[in-house]
Image (spheres, coloured by chain):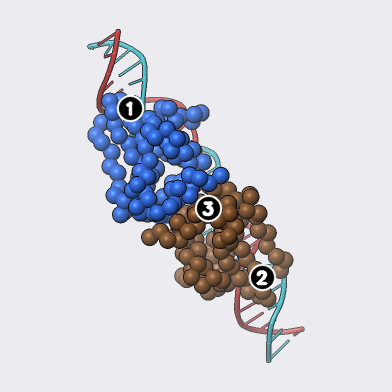
Chain colours: A brown, B blue, C cyan, D red
Amino acid sequence: MAAYDHPAPETFELTIVLRALADPARLEIVRHLERVGEANCATLIGTRPKSSMSHHFQVLRDSGILRTRIEGVQHRNSLRREELDMRFPGLLAAILKAP
Amino acid sequence: MAAYDHPAPETFELTIVLRALADPARLEIVRHLERVGEANCATLIGTRPKSSMSHHFQVLRDSGILRTRIEGVQHRNSLRREELDMRFPGLLAAILKAP
DNA sequence: CATATTGTTCGACAATAATCGAACAAGGCA
DNA sequence: TGCCTTGTTCGATTATTGTCGAACAATATG
């Protein structure tokens, strides 16, 4: 499979980032990635089906919140912390430490 | 009209706050309130009809982002900065300074 | 009291987004 | 080659949100 397209930080849109984070499933993904650094989709699937998770990862990827690196058959996801912080300083930190 | 109910800071929900802010019209309301401090609904109506604006104010109010004080026939809105910052430190600041 | 002002509420419709099974694609490996 | 694993894509359905006119409520003011 070809590599994914990831938006450039200058093109991140605040409303799109907020909308991406305004979902419990996606917030959980983001928080998990903060803890473990990098994870493939499978390790993040709880009760939801693959297709639902694939959708959430796509929303997060398209908004700029995470990047996906393909390694063999696995897709490794990690937060784009520096790039998000460049565009929206303090935003991700505030969200990650929120209750 | 009776006074509005405003949620207590301890009950603010991150996903609900993010969802409230993840809308261009509401983000504009919030940014305007930051500049002017307090404003009634009428001064914030651009091209949208009253009923749409009333809806957006309700979403912002219910999430805890703003308070509405009734004075005569006008409803004066202002940001709940301290309370939001108590619950989600840095969040509103990051959003207000974002491009 | 009549009227104007400020917003809310209701109801219907449109638009957007989430959910999930099934089929598919790409590697890795026996 | 055949099969397993990982994840995407498609399509249909459901759920959630936004939009907006019309009617209503509350207050002020002539």
> Dot 2 lies on which element?
strand
Q: Which residue is mark 1?
A: B74
Image mark 3: chain: A
Are the residues under marks 1 and 3 on the same chain?
no
Q: CA distance from mark 1 to mark 3?
A: 36 Å
Q: Which residue is mark 2?
A: A70
Name which quarter of the figure residue D10 lies in. bottom right
Image mark 1: chain: B
Residue at the (55%, 68%) spot, across then down: A50
Say which label, 2 or 3, has the lower sequence index.
Answer: 2
Q: Which residue is mark 3?
A: A89
In the rendered image, residue B62, in percent from the top left (x then y), is placed at 35, 45
Numbered marks: total: 3
For residue A59, say whether it is visible. Answer: no
Name which quarter of the figure residue D4 lies in. bottom right
Q: CA distance from mark 2 to mark 3?
A: 28 Å
Of the residues shown, which amino acid type is indicated by label 3? Answer: Pro
Of the residues shown, which amino acid type is indicated by label 2? Answer: Ile
Report the quarter where the N terminus of chain B lies. top left
Q: Nearer the viewer, residue B14 or A51?
A: B14
* In the depicted structure, whether residue B11 falls above or below residue C4: below
> Dot 1 lies on which element?
strand
Residue at the (35%, 54%) spot, across then down: B87
Mark 1: few, some, or many residues within 10 Å (few <14, many ≥20)? Answer: few
Of the residues shown, which amino acid type is indicated by label 1? Answer: Gln
The image's mark for residue A34 is: none
Q: Nearer the viewer, residue C29 or C6?
A: C6
Report the quarter where the C terminus of chain B lies. top right
Image mark 2: chain: A
Residue at the (49%, 54%) spot, across then down: A91
